[in-house]
Image (spheres, rainbow, N blue to C red):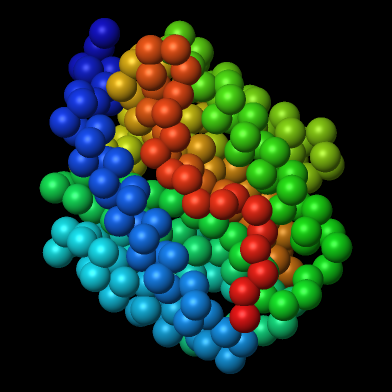
Amino acid sequence: MNVYQNYACKEEAELSAMRKAAWIAEQALTATLPFVKIGMSERELAAELTLQLYRAGCDPELAFSPIVSSGPNSANPHATPSDRILTNGDLLVIDWGASYMGYQSDITRTFRIGEIEPEFMQIGKIVLKANTSGRNTAKPGITAASIDKATRAVIESAGYGKFFTHRTGHGLGMEGHEEPYIRADNLMPLETGMTFTIEPGIYMPGRNGVRIEDDVVISETGTECLTSLPREIIQLG
């Protein structure tokens, strides 16, 4: 095991903190969703979510500032909350996390505001299938590249490969991005205790985007998913 693999393999006390960080994040989003409505701005929603993270028990230093992006903004994987108003027909991407005892969670869920175009419902199903494929592929001995391939193949076979524009995931711990990086050129074999995200997406410039992100840890026989909120595109507003 090299130094990066040793750093990436978490002990039980570390995993316990990461489970709590995931729980805090999910409690915060659950408390925030009832406030979501047409006419609310991305910035207002991000502020409410930040407040709820602290109420749920997040460390004073957030894991990262929440990403709240809607409509055309959701097609930018690295968007920042703006004054754009949530509108009927939008997809709404929320990427957030909590920190607990210095350990982080990093989750993304996508919602819809009112009725959306049938194609956007379809890409939501495709991304969910890709996310599921990645989570089901992960196990000890599998390379990081194999997980990237499993998620990407689903999106490519559906004809949206050019709209999946980033790696499938990244390691997670006290740092928001660390080994193992889940990308096509990383042949590192995964070992028990390695913790990382699986976050495929489809981003259609000028229209809408979908990302579904979960935090997983390699167990002795497969994976444990630290995140549990529904992954389907749920209607809000």
Q: Is residue 119 left or right of residue 98?
A: right
Tell me the quarter of the image containing the N terminus: top left
Question: Picture coordinates of residue 12 (x, y %)?
Answer: 21, 26
How many marks can you see?
0
Q: Quadrant of residue 133?
A: top right
Q: Is residue 123 left or right of residue 17?
A: right
Q: Quadrant of residue 24?
A: bottom left
Tell me the quarter of the image containing the C terminus: bottom right
Question: Picture coordinates of residue 157 (x, y %)?
Answer: 81, 33
Residue 84 visible to an observer of this rendering = no
Q: Is residue 96 left or right of residue 79?
A: left
Residue drawn where x is 44% and y is 65% of the image: 30
Residue drawn where x is 63% and y is 25% of the image: 149
User: Which of 145/211 is in front?
Assistant: 211
Question: Picture coordinates of residue 188 (x, y %)?
Answer: 42, 15
Residue 135 visible to an observer of this rendering = yes
Q: Relative to 71, say whether 209 is above or below.
A: above
Residue drawn where x is 44% and y is 51% of the image: 107
Extreme-bottom residue of the structure: 39
Question: Picture coordinates of residue 181 (x, y %)?
Answer: 42, 31
